[in-house]
């Protein structure tokens, strides 16, 4: 039987999702809205949960949140283009707005939907523009632009985010849990999905260790610069005396620091005719490793990473 079949006998369904207590009880409505989004995305990514296996209210919340974010960023045309504008997406947004009591915005959304859905060519143009004037598909629809402005006004006057958060707090499927327990409740839900590995395999993905990933992504107890300075001090390298402007980040997550004279090269800043060092963060071991860089030549700089001369373990906060 297809592992994505809603009728599969091993399909595991959740009647609630956990939210960290600080987000549930916080004053910022977006903290709760984004926490629901984070939890749903985590269960999707790690647990391979399907739409019908999570409380429908959580899906509606995510769609409304996405709608708000896209419209605020680039208008209704951007939302239509980026969301895929399927009948399912449209129904989710309209149902979500109705459920949380945002009736004025629901009416506005329905008007926009009717406008773009009535003409296939117009819908194609809107999707192609994505909120920007297009050489082949014309300028952004002025009528939709006015609806964007109306949305911004309604969002502000009706406290849209507050309404959304209040609705979430009223739902039995939103479960507040102590902050430090959240990851364990999530991990349990991930393991409970028996079809997880089969679904990930069918999509060409590997199962990831959620707890290992969340620990690796937890905030550092001290700023990274402090750890680098401590590592350098162990080897009598005075790094903390360098100005802030001398710090640069490689796309691979490496940091370099060097002497006074600097020259720019693609993706890396290195010292010229001065001794240089490189610190690389190793995710798998949660360590910062120190290397000596060898610079060869004068006008043409060649950077060579020498052997590691030391390392330090980074300490992370408990999430």
Image: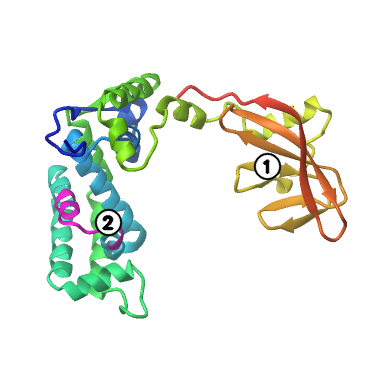
Q: Say which quarter of the image contains residue 51.
A: top left
Dot 2, crowdedness within 10 Å: few (<14), some or many (≥20)? some
Q: Classify mark 1: helix, strand or loop.
A: strand
Q: Nearer the viewer, residue 91 or 278?
A: 278
Q: Is residue 265 visible?
A: yes
Point out residue 91 in the picture as x, y percentages from the top left corner: 14, 52
Q: Residue at x 79, y 45 (%)?
A: 258
Q: CA distance from mark 2 to mark 1?
A: 37 Å
The colour scheme used to paint the residues is rainbow
Point out residue 211 in the picture as x, y percentages from the top left corner: 42, 25
Q: Is residue 187 left or right of residue 7?
A: right
- Which label was assigned to residue 83? 2
Q: Which residues are magenta?
A: 81-92
Question: Do labels 2 and 1 touch, CB within 8 Å?
Answer: no
Point out residue 52 in the picture as x, y percentages from the top left corner: 17, 37
Q: Is residue 166 magenta?
A: no
* Residue 314 in the image: above or below residue 94: above
Q: Is residue 87 magenta?
A: yes
Q: Classify mark 2: helix, strand or loop.
A: helix
Name the residue that disc number 1 marks: 255
Q: Is residue 40 visible?
A: no
Quarter of the image with the C terminus in it: top left
Q: Say which quarter of the image contains residue 221.
A: top right
């Amino acid at each position: 039987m297809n592992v994505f079949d809603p009728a599969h006998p091993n399909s595991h369904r959740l009647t609630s999702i956990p939210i960290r207590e600080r987000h549930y009880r916080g004053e910022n409505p977006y903290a709760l809205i984004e926490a629901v989004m984070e939890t749903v995305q985590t269960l999707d990514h790690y647990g391979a949960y399907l739409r019908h296996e999570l409380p429908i209210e959580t899906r509606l919340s995510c769609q409304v949140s996405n709608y708000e974010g896209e419209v605020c960023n680039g208008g209704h045309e951007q939302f239509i283009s980026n969301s895929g504008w399927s009948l399912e997406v449209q129904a989710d947004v309209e149902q979500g707005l109705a459920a949380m009591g945002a009736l004025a915005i629901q009416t506005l959304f329905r008007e926009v939907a009717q406008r773009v859905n009535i003409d296939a060519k117009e819908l194609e143009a809107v999707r192609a523009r994505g909120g920007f004037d297009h050489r082949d598909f014309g300028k952004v629809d002025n009528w939709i632009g006015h609806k964007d402005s109306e949305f911004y006004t309604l969002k502000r006057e009706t406290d849209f985010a507050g309404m959304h958060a209040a609705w979430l707090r009223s739902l039995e499927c939103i479960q507040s849990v102590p902050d430090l327990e959240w990851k364990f409740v999530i991990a349990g839900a991930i393991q409970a999905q028996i079809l997880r590995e089969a679904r990930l395999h069918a999509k060409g993905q590997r199962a990831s260790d959620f707890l290992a990933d969340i620990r690796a992504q937890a905030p550092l107890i001290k700023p990274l610069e402090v750890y680098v300075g401590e590592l350098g001090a162990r080897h009598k390298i005075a790094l903390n005396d360098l100005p802030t402007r001398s710090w640069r980040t490689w796309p691979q997550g490496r940091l370099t620091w060097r002497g006074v004279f600097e020259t720019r090269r693609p993706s890396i800043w290195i010292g010229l005719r001065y001794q240089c060092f490189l610190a690389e963060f190793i995710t798998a071991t949660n360590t910062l490793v120190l290397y000596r860089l060898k610079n060869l030549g004068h006008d043409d700089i060649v950077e060579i990473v020498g052997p590691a001369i030391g390392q330090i373990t980074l300490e992370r906060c408990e999430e």
